[in-house]
Amino acid sequence: MKIIAYGIRKDEKPYVAKWQAEHPEVEVKIVEDLLLDETVNLAQGFDGVVAFQQAPYTDNVLATLAGYGIHYLSLRNVGVDNLNPVAVKANKIKVTNVPVYSPAAIAEFSVTQLLNLLRRTKEYFHKFERHDYRWAPEISHELNQQVVGVIGTGHIGRVAINIYKGFGAKVIAYDKFHNPELEAEGLYVDSLDELYAQATVITLHIPLFPETEHMLDQAAFAKMNDGVYIINASRGPLIDETALIEALDSGKVAGAALDVLEDETKVFNHDMAGKNMDYPEFWNLDSRENVLISPHTAFYTDVAVMNMVKQSFDANLELIQTGNSEKEVSFD
């Protein structure tokens, strides 16, 4: 049995080596490049593919894999929005993901970024750079005084809720699918409009689907409280960045913490020192004292990376051996 793994980073290699040592019957080839039209030919002769990337898996990549007789693709992440479902089904590709690798990693990071916004740490950092050590006028807000609206109560959202409750914040939540425990606590509101009307903080923990793209747009911001804080460690296109900029300009949004962006592949995971980049929304947002941007690193902990490697390789091997996996993603 032979597995080729694309986009393997330095931090993943020890976990890949550990997995291979535990499965000596499997030949593993590590490729640092992403699974692209230019690199898919490296998969010829293998039984399965493990991959992780922000760039799309093109229709040509999927067709080429199928042409090589490869029908098993295991992703080392949750999201499958960079796969064309039509092409997946047409080429009879079975796709697995890692739906739960470390909810705490993302939840903890999102709360940390909110605390940084409330305590205005970016502004103080810039004052220190200028050797200005006065505390005024950057007075802060306390998390225990906030009404936190959590959109999405899956694994990550539920961990975030527990953390916010631990800080003493009032928590409300919206999800099409209610968790029985949260239902019993009375945390759910009936609509997004109701959440927008009550929340002083809105944090996103939902997948990207066609119906959720730009869910936070001009109309949504208009329904929110003045001075609301926005946290997004989920998917960039959930927010219309042009509308967010307008809301920041007007003061409708007091601050935003963005671990993901609409067009993040232009900048994230690249060394852009001395390089030009055509992304005016990024430059606008990054220049603001009340906006925190991180390069899609909410997931990036040792625990999460270990689980992403192990679970994806386990799933790929399971597909090769049996043709099925409990982590298979449905595109129906």
Image (cartoon, helix red, strand yellow):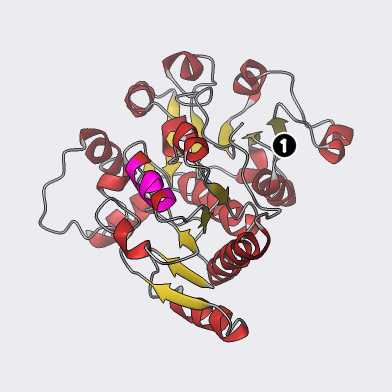
| Residue that numbered label 1 is attached to | 170
Above or below 15: residue 117: above
Q: Residue at x 54, y 81 (%)?
A: 20
Residue 148 drawn in magenta: no
**Quadrant of the image containing the C terminus:** top right
The residue nearer to you, when weighing 205 against 161, is 205
Residue 66: percent from left, percent from top? 44, 49
| Principal secondary structure, stretch drawn in magenta | helix
Left or right side of 194 for 36: left
Displayed quadrant of residue 161: top right
Q: How many marks?
A: 1
Q: Residue at x 37, y 41 (%)?
A: 291
Left or right side of 219 for 286: left
Regarding residue 292, the answer to whether it shows in the image is: no
Residue 137: percent from left, percent from top? 38, 43
Residue range of the region highlighted in magenta in the rendering: 60-66
Residue 15: percent from left, percent from top? 53, 77
Residue 65 drawn in magenta: yes
